[in-house]
Image (tube, rainbow, N blue to C red):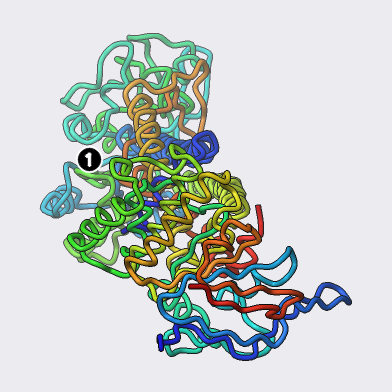
């Protein structure tokens, strides 16, 4: 049996706006194991993004706890939380969110630089990941000189290169056309198979759901279905 | 290092905005440098004018003479005192003087006059009085009944070169002193003497005229560097060891001018403070705009694991980089302007009177102060102004920030 990377223990998240309370996630329990390629799916407002934010420590749960890499991330704050995210979580955002003034190489290196990894190792890792995401020869380009698909590949490379415990992707193909989105997903799945890195992504895209090895369907902030595919 | 790199490149991200903000800081820096240069230069010239033209940097008198000038308050051993003064470090030269008010006659004209007895040799080494003679010549080295008069006195008495002037005053022995003097020179229309009725004569002639014996009323001292005045006052006091003598710097001798100068300099500082506030508001506005526009970006940086302190430093570095670039440009422009005004100055159509002295050219002075102070003011302002927005950026909550556009 695979080791658990992340354990969500009775997590609820309630948003309050004026007098109205919105239960985005309700007493949710979920365990993600190492090496999984999991899609968290559901219609708009089902709580996918909220769950991902709580899992990553970007948002704090109203109730419950999140255990990641043996530590309760939901109880961390400030620099401790920043350092933990830097060392254990890789992010892929819907809008790519590359640093516009840094080149492809520098964007990929960014987290490693924060971690204080030496130049030789950084260079080797960047060269290797650029090959794996098919962006060789583009390391000197700025994000604005890349297509949406290429930018998202850089984001994948940035998320993977620091070798985190888990990569969380919030609707990674939402801004891409179907062909580019499918190509990106295939690449992510291949990387997952070859590196054994754990991927969790939120989506409402059928194409992504079909490619996931585990599908967690949310409905009104609760798990409606959790199925593991072959 | 990566934070520094991002900060530096961010300056060039919005070129027009950075250029405008930079222009404001560079303009402020240049204006401060020029303003300080002009103040230092203007007052430097004025101080040089009256100290070198007449006053000297330091004066020695009999105790109480400066507050209440009297013909009887004399330094009776001027040569001995002079020798002691000359032995003090930084002293370039000294000159003894005798003063008295008198009544001057020429033809049917009469006026009050200030008689100044000077040693023509020592005076020429000490001040520029000799070079103020525009018409005729300076008084002879031998004690003759010759006088050099100011242009104003010449106009009042309607007297010309080689004309005779009669002076009447009271001698130190109580007698009525009266004598005829031949005008051998007239001092120029510009400078310290143009506004006063002054009559220069040989110190020996003046001493005989006033029955003063060998006594003098004043010893003017000129130093190698005006900045050493206060220090040298102490050195001269120690060298003289004479409680009956007073040693005063030009700041005391010309206290009215000095107070006016101080007040004027204080006023120019208020102007600098107002400019600084305007620059601070401009820079603050820019930095706040940066925070607002890049809220999402800061959220992403924090999500990726950038520490709050690193976000804080990113904003501070950006502001500081822009400030440093602006300071380099502003200092270059300001110091170039200072150099130009130092070399060529501004010639005034009508000479301005300040503290009884006239000057017709305003020049700037290139000093370390005019180089360093504006840079420090701009750098400090930019640094202080960036702190609050930087704290705001560091406190951004990633999940909220990433929802913003």
Residue B263 in the image, given as x and y percentages of width and height:
54, 49
Is residue B114 found left or right of B142 in the rendered image? right
Write the residue at 61% across / 49% down.
Answer: B289
Q: Position of residue B386 (x, y in %)?
A: 52, 58
The reply, left or right, for residue B213 in relation to residue A224 is: left
> Is residue A108 depicted above or below A23 in this figure?
above
Q: Does residue B239 appear to the left or right of B5 in the view shown? A: left
Residue A11 in picture, x, y percent from top left: 65, 86
Residue that lies at the very extreme toward the front in this rendered image: A230
Q: Quadrant of residue B148?
A: top left
Q: Quadrant of the N terminus of chain A?
A: bottom left
A180 or A85: which is nearer to us?
A: A180
Question: Is residue B201 at all visible to an observer of this figure?
Answer: yes
Residue visible at 38% across and 18% down in the picture? B188
Label tally: 1
The answer to whether any part of residue B175 appears in the image is no
Q: Is residue B82 left or right of residue A7?
A: left
Q: Position of residue A39 (x, y in %)?
A: 56, 68
Task: Give the camera-side residue of B9 and B36.
Answer: B9
The residue wearing badge 1 is: B95
Which one is in front, B260 or B54?
Answer: B260
Q: Secondary structure at mark 1?
A: strand
Which chain is indicated by disc 1?
B
- Residue count near mark 1 (Cα–Cα under 10 Å), binned few <14, some 14–19, many ≥20: many
Relative depth, front residue between B242 and A197: A197
Residue B37 appears in which quarter of the rendering? Answer: top left
Residue at image location 32% in from the left, 37% down from the top: B366
At x 76%, y 75%, the residue is: A220
């Amino acid at each position: 049996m695979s080791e658990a990377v992340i354990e969500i223990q009775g997590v609820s998240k309630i948003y309050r706006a004026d007098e109205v309370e919105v239960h985005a996630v309700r007493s949710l329990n979920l365990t993600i194991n190492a090496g999984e390629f999991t899609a968290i799916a559901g219609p708009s407002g089902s709580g996918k993004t909220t769950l991902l934010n709580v899992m990553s420590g970007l948002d704090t749960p109203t109730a419950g706890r999140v255990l990641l890499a043996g530590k309760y991330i939901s109880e961390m704050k400030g620099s401790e939380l920043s350092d933990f995210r830097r060392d254990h979580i890789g992010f892929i955002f819907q809008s790519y969110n590359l640093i516009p003034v840094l080149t492809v190489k520098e964007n990929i290196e960014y987290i490693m630089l924060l971690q204080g990894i030496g130049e030789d190792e950084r260079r080797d890792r960047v060269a290797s990941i650029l090959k794996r995401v098919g962006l060789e020869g583009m390391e000197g380009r700025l994000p604005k000189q890349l297509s949406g698909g290429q930018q998202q590949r850089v984001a994948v490379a940035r998320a993977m290169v620091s070798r985190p415990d888990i990569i969380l992707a919030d609707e990674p193909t939402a801004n891409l056309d179907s062909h580019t989105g499918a190509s990106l997903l295939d690449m992510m799945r291949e990387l997952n198979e070859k590196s054994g890195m754990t991927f969790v992504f939120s989506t409402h895209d059928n194409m992504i759901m079909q490619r996931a090895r585990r599908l967690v369907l949310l409905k009104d902030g609760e798990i409606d279905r959790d199925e593991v595919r072959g | 290092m990566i934070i520094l790199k991002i900060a530096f490149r961010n300056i060039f991200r919005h070129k027009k905005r950075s250029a405008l903000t930079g222009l404001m800081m560079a303009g402020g820096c240049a204006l401060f440098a020029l303003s300080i240069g002009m103040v230092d230069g203007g007052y430097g010239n004025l101080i040089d004018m009256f100290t070198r033209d007449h006053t000297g940097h330091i004066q020695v008198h009999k105790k109480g003479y400066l507050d209440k000038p009297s013909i009887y308050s004399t330094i009776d051993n001027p040569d001995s005192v002079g020798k002691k003064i000359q032995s003090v470090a930084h002293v370039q030269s000294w000159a003894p003087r005798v003063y008295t008010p008198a009544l001057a006659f020429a033809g049917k004209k009469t006026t009050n006059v200030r008689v100044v007895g000077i040693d023509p040799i020592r005076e020429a080494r000490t001040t520029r009085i000799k070079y103020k003679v525009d018409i005729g010549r300076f008084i002879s080295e031998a004690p003759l009944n010759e006088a050099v008069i100011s242009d104003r006195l010449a106009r009042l008495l309607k007297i010309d070169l080689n004309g005779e002037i009669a002076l009447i005053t009271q001698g130190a022995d109580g007698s009525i002193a009266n004598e005829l003097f031949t005008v051998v020179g007239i001092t120029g229309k510009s400078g310290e003497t143009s506004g006063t009725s002054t009559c220069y004569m040989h110190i020996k002639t003046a001493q005989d005229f006033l029955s003063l014996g060998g006594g003098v009323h004043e010893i003017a001292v000129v130093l190698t560097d005006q900045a050493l005045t206060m220090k040298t006052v102490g050195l001269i006091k120690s060298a003289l060891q004479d409680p009956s003598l007073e040693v005063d710097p030009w700041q005391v001798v010309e206290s009215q001018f000095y107070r006016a100068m101080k007040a004027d300099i204080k006023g120019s500082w208020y102007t600098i403070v107002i400019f600084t506030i305007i620059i601070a508001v401009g820079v603050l506005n820019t930095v706040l705009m940066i925070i607002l526009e890049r809220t999402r970006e800061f959220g992403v940086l924090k999500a990726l694991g950038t520490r709050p302190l690193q976000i804080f430093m990113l904003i501070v570095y950006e502001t500081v980089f822009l400030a440093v670039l602006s300071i380099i440009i502003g200092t270059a422009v300001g110091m170039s302007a200072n150099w130009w005004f130092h070399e060529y100055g501004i010639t005034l159509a009508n000479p301005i009177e300040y503290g009884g002295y006239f000057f017709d050219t305003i020049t700037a002075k290139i000093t370390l102060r005019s180089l360093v102070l504006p840079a420090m003011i701009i750098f400090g302002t930019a640094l202080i102004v960036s702190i609050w927005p930087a704290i705001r950026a560091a406190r951004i909550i990633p999940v909220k920030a990433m929802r913003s556009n």
